[in-house]
Each structure stands twice: as structure tokens, then as C-alpha cells.
Amino acid sequence: GAVVSQHPSWVICKSGTSVKIECRSLDFQATTMFWYRQFPKQSLMLMATSNEGSKATYEQGVEKDKFLINHASLTLSTLTVTSAHPEDSSFYICSARSGRARSTGELFFGEGSRLTVL
Amino acid sequence: QKEVEQDPGPLSVPEGAIVSLNCTYSNSAFQYFMWYRQYSRKGPELLMYTYSSGNKEDGRFTAQVDKSSKYISLFIRDSQPSDSATYLCAMSEGSQGNLIFGKGTKLSVKP
């Protein structure tokens, strides 16, 4: 399957600071990437859809000014959690669709980034 | 009613058992159905992908979709301790549509 790399895998930061998470498609070009958030024992919740060269589309209830998404190239999308607070502590996962996938619609996920805000 | 319902478990079985995991859904427009496996503190890994109704087999894994009942299943034969993980069902209306995930079922296979 296609490979999606996410970095960092784990980050601890102080309240009020900003944290950037990178998502890269390593062996394919992804015009669209997705950012999810997952709380313990909860399902994956879509936060936003990241489109290369244009503004991200945010899901209802997700603050666009707090969760900045940049999709500057066909292989890289970044999520910046600005002025992080303890309630932002969560597992953030990115995914991308591969146009070369054997079936359309398959999503390939990164390894996830665990954010802990102190 | 949530769009996708999945029993969170946990489900504990002995090694070698046949495992049955399932999800129900309410949106009859869903056509693409997927099963993902997620190990602790890792991103989900695609296991099975099915379009519309029917069965699909891949090694020890079989995915079934019953659109008339709005019910999908994942069977794992000869389960192994390495199968211990959380299994998430996911589905979408179109091939490029948003995936809606179940909560995931935590499976533990005991040696």
C-alpha cells in the first residue's frame, strides 16, 4: 500500500505554545489530505480536508484559526495547533488518497502524532 | 442514531478462534466499505476494502457487506495474538467522499 509519513510521533509542549505536525505522502502525490483527531476509546473525527494549493475545508465545530492547515505541495500537508491548551491534547492522524491505489477511495494513514499540552 | 454503530468491546478470544466483528449503519447511500486495523498509538492500517454488497476474502480475513440489512462484518480465521488491535469499520457514499468511522472494536487474542 501507499506510504504516509507523519512527524513528530509524540510531542509535549507548554500551554500557549504552537505545535506543527507534518504529513508526507512518500511514494505518491496527494492532492487531498485529511486531518483527524482521535480521543481515547473514541472514533476518528475528521477535522479538515487539506487541498493542495487552496484553503482547507474545516468540519463544523473546528476552529480554523486554531488549527492551521497548509498544503503547500502534492506530498506535504502541515497542521499547526496554535496557542495549544491542555484540552487540545489528543492523537492527531493524517491520511491521503492515492490516485494509484488499486481501488479508488482508499485512505492511507500516517502513524499519528500524540500531542500532550502541559 | 449515529451513522455508524460499532460495539467497542473489548472482545477477548483464544488463539485459533474465529473472530466476528461487525458494524451497522443508517445511511443507505454508503457504497464503499472498509476495515482498518489500529495498533495502540499507531495510525490505522487498511485491511479490507469492499464496494457495494458481497464478500471479499484475503488470507485469513473475510469482509461481508449486506446492504439490505445495512450490516457489514469482518471475519478473522485462525486468530493470532498479533491480531490483537482495534478494528475500525469505515464507509463512504462515493469513492472520493468523506469516510465515516465506527468507534472501533478492541480485540485481544490470548495465546
Image (cartoon, helix red, strand yellow):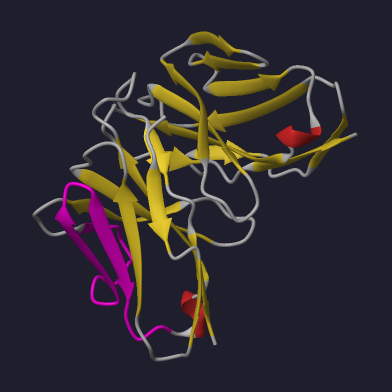
Question: Is residue A82 found inside the magenta-colored segment of the image?
Answer: yes
* Image side of residue A99 versus residue A82, left or right: left
User: Height in image: B49 above or below A78?
Assistant: above
Boundaries of the magenta span = A57-84
Say which quarter of the image contains residue B23: top right
User: Height in image: A64 above or below A28?
Assistant: below
Percent from the top left, x then y, of residue A57? 20, 56
Say which quarter of the image contains residue B12: top right
Percent from the top left, x then y, of residue A50? 22, 53
Question: Is residue A101 found inside the magenta-colored segment of the image?
Answer: no
Furthest residue toward front: A27
Say which quarter of the image contains residue B22: top right
User: Height in image: A30 above or below B77?
Assistant: below
* Image side of residue A13 versus residue A53, left or right: right
Percent from the top left, x then y, of residue B81? 80, 34
Task: Identify which residue is drawn at 69% across, 44% down.
Answer: B8
User: Height in image: A55 above or below B110?
Assistant: below
Is the C terminus of chain B in the top left, top right, bottom left or bottom right quadrant? Answer: top right
Residue nearest the observer in this picture, B73 or A113: A113
Task: Identify which residue is drawn at 26% across, 25% down.
Answer: A100
* Image side of residue B81 versus residue A37, left or right: right
Percent from the top left, x then y, of residue B53? 46, 11
Task: Identify which residue is drawn at 44% across, 65% down.
Answer: A8
Q: How many marks?
A: 0
